[in-house]
Image: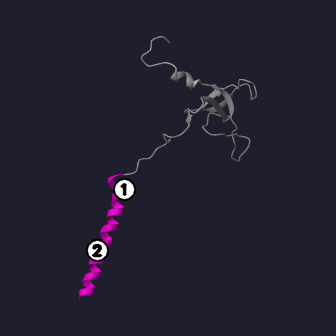
Amino acid sequence: MSTLRTTNVLLAAIVLVLLALVLRPLRTPEPVLAQSSDTDYYFEPGTFLVRAPDNSQQITVYAKVVVDLRNGRIWAFPTFSTAPYPADPIYSKPQTSHPFELGRFALEDTKKFSPLSTDH
C-alpha cells in the first residue's frame, strides 16, 4: 500500500511540474521582434525607383533601400518590380539581388554638434 501511495504522489508531482512548464508561456509570453535592436542595417519599408549614381544599372530600377548604420553607406538591392523581394517575371526560379551603392550619410558629423548648441 505504501508503494502505491508513493507512486501516486510522484506521478502527481510530475504532472504538476509539467503543467507549470506548459502554462508558463501563457502567463508571460516571449516577446517577438520583427527586427532585432542590435542590427547594423536599416531596411527602408517598401521599394523605391532609384538610379545608380555611376549609371552602372539601368536608367531607373525598383529597389529595396538599406542603410548600413555603422558607416552610413546607403545601398540599393534591385527587385525589378514593386515587390519587396527580387522577382523577374521572365524566370521562374528565385532571383539573387546584388546591391549597388547609392551614397553615404555622414553619421560622424552628428556627433560634432552639441544638442544645446545653436550655431549649426
**Residue at the right extreme, as displayed:** 56
Name the quadrant of the N terminus. Answer: bottom left
Quadrant of residue 70 within the rendered picture: top right
74 versus 29 height, above or below: above
- Give, as a three-letter code, the residue at label 2: Ala
Region in magenta:
1-28
Disc 2 target residue: 12
Residue 102, image x, y percentages: 66, 27
Disc 1 target residue: 25
In the displayed structure image, the side of residue 115 where residue 105 appears, left or right: right
Residue 26, image x, y percentages: 34, 55
Residue displayed at 46% across by 44% down: 33
Depth check, front residue: 80 or 4: 4
Residue 98, image x, y percentages: 70, 38
In the displayed structure image, the side of residue 47 where residue 96 appears, left or right: right
Instruction: Residue 103: give its label.
Output: none
Depth check, front residue: 108 or 102: 108
Q: Is residue 56 magenta?
A: no
Residue displayed at 29% across by 81% down: 7
